[in-house]
Image: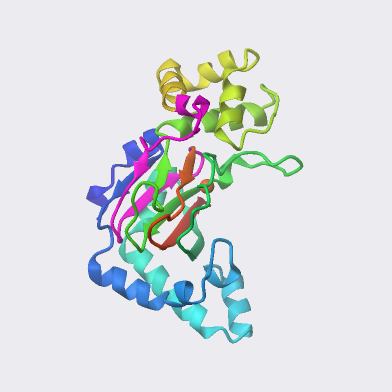
Amino acid sequence: MQENINIEQLKDKGFLTIKNFLDKKEVEKIVNRLKEVPLENIGHGDQRGYFPVTAKAKLAKFLKLDFKSLITSSMLIKMAEKLELKKIAENFFKSDVNLHMIDSYYSPVSKEPCIDWHSDMTFKPGINYNINIASLKFFFYLTDVQSKNGCLAYVPYSNVITKAVAELIVSKKIKYTPYWDLQKLRNLVLSKDNLNQILNVTGEEKFEKFIENTKFIENKDKDTEKFDLEMGRGGVVIFDEFGVHRGSMPSKTSRQVLRIFYRKK
Ligand SMILES: [Fe+2]
């Protein structure tokens, strides 16, 4: 499995996609194990969709006699081991890593607008910020997804820009202003107070690519399908959560995903 993974590309662009990363049998086994997720309409952030990965969380489930969740967790951890996800994360971080989180959630067909373009690793005022807690995320599609129907999109090289911004804020070289959403991030990096400092860290080529790739946010509909990552079920998007991404709403078919996150030790 490892030979298929282009770690340099993952580091550089911030993401990579692998079609049929899970074979049909594996997908069926997982879907069957996670069938309560669609049946009980378990959505994003619902505690019932989280499966314990630490000894403490496992003990808590045990004390609640939630053996089902323990069995699911053990099966998913075994699958992750077989797929060598930890090794991929270790190669990515060049460090030992911990399995940080496993969850699955279901999104019914919806006409709601998609989640705005954003980075997962930006400051929230008042919270002590640690750049080293960023995750490498394995985002498995358990249903087919397309543009405007549940697929993720990721702006290549945006991970380099947000990481530079975070480092410069932490070292107090630039002033913090909110930048969770892409428009604010662009404003921050293009401001004359910050531009040169950011360019010094990212280099001109990646910076210009980012500016060019994110121009769409100035358009009327503030969206593009250019970076959509369409895939069949069993496909995975592996991504650095620093990078700018968005999820499109499942407008035609419902969607179920499985997510597995690793962090540096
Ligand atoms: Fe996100």
Magenta residue span: 214-243
Residue 76 spot, x, y in % from top left: 41, 70
Residue placed most toward the observer, 187 or 147: 147
Image quadrant occupied by the N terminus? bottom left
Q: Could you tell me how many numbered marks the image carries? A: 0
Residue placed most toward the observer, 73 or 124: 124
Residue at 62%, 33% (x, y): give it. 179
Magenta: main secondary structure equals loop
Residue 6 spot, x, y in % from top left: 29, 42
- Residue 199 visible in image: yes
263 relative position to 150: left or right = right
Q: Which quadrant would residue 190 be assigned to in this image?
A: top right
Is residue 239 covered in magenta?
yes
Residue 45 spot, x, y in % from top left: 58, 62
Residue at 45%, 47% (x, y): give it. 95
- Residue 94 visible in image: no
* Colouring scheme, one of rainbow, by chain, secondary structure, one colour: rainbow
192 relative position to 143: left or right = right
Extreme residue in the right direction: 126
Residue at 33%, 59% (x, y): give it. 84
Residue placed most toward the observer, 260 or 263: 260
Residue 99 spot, x, y in % from top left: 48, 60
Residue at 38%, 61% (x, y): give it. 253
In the depicted structure, whether residue 123 falls above or below residue 263:
above
Q: Which quadrant would residue 170 be assigned to in this image?
A: top right
In the depicted structure, whether residue 239 falls above or below residue 71:
above
In the depicted structure, whether residue 40 falls above or below residue 205:
below
Is residue 241 covered in magenta?
yes
